[in-house]
C-alpha cells in the first residue's frame, strides 16, 4: 500500500509509564499525557487499554491521516495544564 494515505487509523503504542510515574515526570493517572502527529490539528485522541504504571502500558491513538512515508508521532507528558484528547 505504498503511496496511500491512511485515514482514521488506529495506532498501538507501548509506553513504559512506570518509570515516568516513579520519576515524577508523568501523573499517576496520566492526565498530563498527550500525543501529536505532524499533520494533526491539536492532540490526538487516545485510549489507555491496559497497564498504566507498568513497564508495558498499551495505548491506542486515533490518527486522522497518515501520509505516505510518515512514521513520526510525538508523546508529551509532565504539563499539569495539558488537556488530553481521550
Image: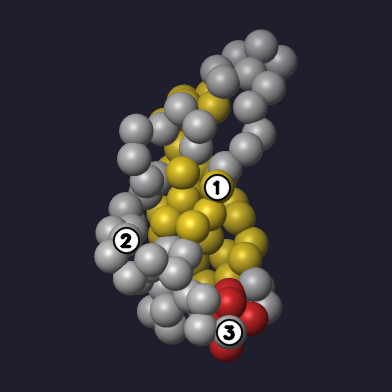
Q: Residues within 10 Å of mark 2 (few under 14, many from 20)?
A: some
Image point 68% across, 22% down: which residue?
A: 69
Q: CA distance from mark 2 to mark 3?
A: 19 Å
On the image, numbered disc 2 is attached to which residue?
82
| Nearer to us in this view, 79 or 2 | 79
Q: Earlier in the sequence, mark 1 or mark 2?
A: 1
On the image, numbered disc 3 is attached to which residue?
23
Q: Earlier in the sequence, mark 2 or mark 3?
A: 3
| Nearer to us in this view, 10 or 16 | 16
Q: Residues within 10 Å of mark 1 (few under 14, many from 20)?
A: few
Image point 33% across, 70% down: which residue?
A: 80
Residue at disc 1, secondary structure: strand
Q: Position of residue 8 (x, y in %)?
A: 43, 32
Could you say which disc has been placed on residue 74 in the image?
Answer: 1
The answer to whether residue 53 of the structure is visible from this angle is no
- Select label 3 or label 1 by which is in front: 3
Which color mode does the image show?
Answer: secondary structure
Q: Residues within 10 Å of mark 3 (few under 14, many from 20)?
A: few
Q: CA distance from mark 1 to mark 2?
A: 14 Å
Q: Earlier in the sequence, mark 3 or mark 1?
A: 3
Amino acid at each position: 500500500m505504498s503511496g496511500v494515505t491512511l485515514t482514521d487509523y488506529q495506532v498501538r503504542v507501548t509506553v513504559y509509564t512506570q518509570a515516568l510515574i516513579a520519576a515524577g515526570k508523568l501523573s499517576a493517572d496520566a492526565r498530563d499525557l498527550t500525543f501529536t502527529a505532524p499533520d494533526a490539528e491539536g492532540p490526538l485522541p487516545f485510549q489507555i487499554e491496559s497497564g498504566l504504571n507498568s513497564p508495558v502500558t498499551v495505548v491506542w491513538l486515533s490518527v486522522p491521516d497518515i501520509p505516505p512515508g510518515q512514521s513520526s508521532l510525538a508523546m508529551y507528558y509532565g504539563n499539569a495544564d495539558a488537556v488530553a484528547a481521550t
